[in-house]
C-alpha cells in the first residue's frame, strides 16, 4: 500500500453505520457513540502508525461498543443473593419490604417531603418519621439522617466539638471502608480520650478520666467483632449513673438497630433507653430492616440541638429514603415483622429450608447434594454467631468452582454464590422463594446442564 497507512481505516460515517454501533446508539444517543467511535479510530491510527496491521471495521466497532460497556459495568443491578449472608454489605444490606418499595415508587414524583397539606405552607422534612420513631421507641426526641456514621458525626460535633469524649479502647472500631471511630471523632472536632485497655475497661477508668474538659461519654457496641476470654466492661446503667453524676450526656451507639427481644449478644434499643442512655444511635438498614439511614433517639433537648446544627442540613435524609423509612416504621408499629425480608430470612425454619433445598438439589441431579451448614447475619451484626442452615453443595467438575461462580455472576440476573473447597455452595436462606425457579435455571446453565 502506498502513502499513509492510516488511509486504509474506515471513515467515521462508516463506523457509525456499523450495526453494533447503530444498535447501541438507540440506547446511548449519537453524541456518546460518536465520541466512542472517535476514540476507537484514534486507537486504530496509533496502531497502524506503530507498524501494526490496520484493524477491521468489526474490530473498531467492537472497541467502541466495549468502551461504552465498560462505563456501565459497575452500575447497580438486582442480584440473587445465594450466599446465606442476610445483611450482605456489598449487596446493599437489608432488602426493602413490599410496603417500603411501594412508598418509594409513590415518592419518585412530586411529594409532600416539605409541604404541610393542612396549612398549605412549608412542612418539616421527616416530621412523620420522627413522630413514628418516638411512638415506636418511647423516646421523647427523634431525628433521622442519611446514615449511622453521619448520625454519630452530627452528635459528636453538636455536643462536644472542641472538648473531650471518653471511649473505651476496646470500642474504637473500624466500621468498614477503613472508616474508624477515631477518624470520625477527629473530623467532628472532638478530642478522643481512650480509657481502659483493649480487653478490660472498668468503671473507675471512666471516672478517673473525667475532668472539666469532658463533654460526652460514648459507648460503642463492637458490632463487627467479638473479644472473648479475659474481658470486662461496666454495665451501661453504671456508666449512665457516672455520666449523670458528672453532668455529661451518655451517647450509646448500638449499631444494628435491634429494637427489643434477644438475638445473640446484640444490644437492644429498649435496653439502652431503659438503662438511661441520653442518646442512642443505630442503623436503619441492618436488623431494623429498612433503608440506609441513621436514627437518633433520646432526650428531646439534645435531639433539638442536633436538629438545629448546621451539619444536620448536610446529612439530611432524601425523600426516597424517607418514604421507605416511614413505611418500615409503620411495619414495626403494626407488629408485622414477617413483612420485613430481613426478619423472614432470620426466622425461616430449617424444615422450610430443607424442603426447598432438597427440591432444587434433585432438579440439579447427581452434581448436587445437601449438607448442614450455617448462615450469618452479616452487616456488622451478631459477630461470630451463625444460624443453622441447609446448604446445596454442587460439584462443578469438569471445571473449577471459581469458574462456576464466575458464570453465575454473568447470569441475568447475576447470582452471587460461595466457592468452598472445590464446591459451589448455595444457601437459600437469603433467596426469596419466588426466585427459586430463576436460580435453578441459572445453576443449570452455569454447571453445563
Image (tube, rainbow, N blue to C red):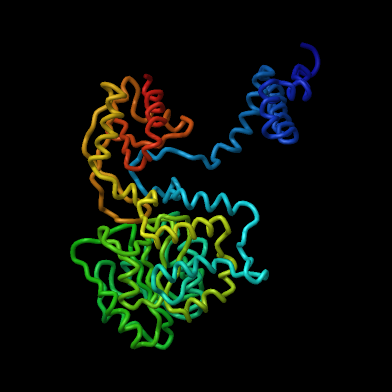
- The correct choice, above or below, for 449 with respect to 179 in the image is above
Is residue 445 shown left or right of residue 351? Answer: right
Instruction: Give the residue at the far front of this rendering.
Output: 118
Is residue 392 shown left or right of residue 307? Answer: left
Figure quadrant of residue 287: bottom left
Q: Position of residue 416 (x, y in %)?
A: 40, 37
Q: What residue is rendered at 44% in x and 55% in y?
A: 290
- The correct choice, above or below, for 265 with respect to 93 in the image is below
Q: Nearer the viewer, residue 331 or 289?
A: 331
Say which quadrant the N terminus sits in. top right
- The correct choice, above or below, for 405 with respect to 305 in the image is above
Q: Nearer the viewer, residue 177 or 285?
A: 285
Instruction: Give the residue at the far top of this rendering.
Output: 1
Q: Nearer the viewer, residue 114 or 163?
A: 114
Is residue 233 shown left or right of residue 59? Answer: left
Q: What residue is rendered at 21% in x and 61% in y?
A: 228
Q: What residue is rendered at 54% in x and 52% in y?
A: 104
Q: Position of residue 405 (x, y in %)?
A: 38, 31
Q: Position of residue 222 (x, y in %)?
A: 33, 63
Instruction: Give the residue at the far left of this rendering.
Output: 230
Figure quadrant of residue 79: top left
Amino acid at each position: 500500500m502506498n502513502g499513509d497507512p492510516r488511509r486504509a481505516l474506515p471513515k467515521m460515517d462508516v463506523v457509525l453505520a456499523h450495526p453494533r454501533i447503530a444498535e447501541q446508539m438507540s440506547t446511548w444517543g449519537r453524541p456518546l457513540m460518536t465520541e466512542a467511535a472517535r476514540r476507537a479510530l484514534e486507537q486504530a491510527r496509533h496502531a497502524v502508525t506503530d507498524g501494526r496491521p490496520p484493524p477491521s471495521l468489526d474490530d473498531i466497532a467492537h472497541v467502541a461498543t466495549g468502551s461504552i460497556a465498560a462505563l456501565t459495568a459497575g452500575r447497580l443491578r438486582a442480584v440473587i443473593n445465594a450466599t446465606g449472608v442476610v445483611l450482605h454489605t456489598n449487596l446493599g444490606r437489608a432488602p426493602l419490604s413490599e410496603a417500603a418499595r411501594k412508598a418509594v415508587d409513590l415518592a419518585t414524583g412530586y411529594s409532600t417531603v416539605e409541604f404541610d397539606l393542612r396549612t398549605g405552607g412549608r412542612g418539616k422534612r421527616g416530621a412523620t418519621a420522627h413522630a413514628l420513631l418516638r411512638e415506636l421507641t418511647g423516646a421523647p426526641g427523634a431525628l433521622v439522617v442519611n446514615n449511622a456514621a453521619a448520625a454519630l458525626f452530627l452528635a459528636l460535633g453538636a455536643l462536644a466539638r472542641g472538648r473531650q469524649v471518653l471511649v473505651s479502647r476496646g470500642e474504637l472500631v473500624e466500621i468498614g471502608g477503613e472508616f474508624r471511630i477515631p477518624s470520625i471523632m477527629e473530623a467532628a472536632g472532638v478530642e478522643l480520650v481512650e480509657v481502659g485497655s483493649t480487653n478490660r475497661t472498668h468503671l473507675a477508668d471512666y471516672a478517673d478520666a473525667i475532668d472539666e474538659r469532658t463533654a460526652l461519654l460514648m459507648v460503642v457496641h463492637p458490632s463487627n467483632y467479638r473479644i472473648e476470654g479475659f474481658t470486662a466492661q461496666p454495665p451501661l446503667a453504671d456508666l449512665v449513673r457516672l455520666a449523670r453524676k458528672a453532668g455529661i450526656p451518655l451517647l450509646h451507639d448500638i449499631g444494628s438497630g435491634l429494637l427489643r427481644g434477644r438475638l445473640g449478644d446484640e444490644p437492644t434499643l429498649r435496653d439502652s433507653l431503659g438503662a438511661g442512655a441520653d442518646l442512642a444511635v443505630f442503623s436503619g438498614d441492618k436488623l431494623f430492616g429498612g433503608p440506609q439511614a441513621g436514627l437518633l433517639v433520646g432526650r428531646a433537648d439534645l435531639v433539638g440541638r442536633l436538629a438545629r446544627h448546621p451539619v444536620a442540613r448536610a446529612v439530611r435524609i432524601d425523600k426516597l429514603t424517607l418514604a421507605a423509612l416511614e413505611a418500615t416504621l409503620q411495619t414495626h408499629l403494626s407488629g408485622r415483622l414477617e413483612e420485613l425480608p430481613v426478619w423472614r430470612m432470620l426466622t425461616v425454619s430449617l424444615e422450610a429450608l430443607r424442603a426447598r433445598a432438597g427440591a432444587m438439589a434433585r432438579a440439579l441431579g447427581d452434581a448436587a447434594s445437601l449438607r448442614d451448614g450455617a448462615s450469618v447475619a452479616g452487616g456488622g451484626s451478631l459477630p461470630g454467631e451463625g444460624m443453622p442452615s441447609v446448604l446445596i453443595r454442587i460439584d462443578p467438575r469438569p471445571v473449577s468452582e471459581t469458574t462456576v461462580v464466575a458464570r453465575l455472576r454473568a447470569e441475568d440476573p447475576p447470582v452471587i454464590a460461595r466457592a468452598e473447597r472445590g464446591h459451589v455452595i448455595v444457601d437459600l436462606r437469603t433467596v426469596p422463594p419466588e426466585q427459586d425457579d430463576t436460580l435453578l435455571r441459572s445453576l443449570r446453565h452455569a454447571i453445563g446442564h
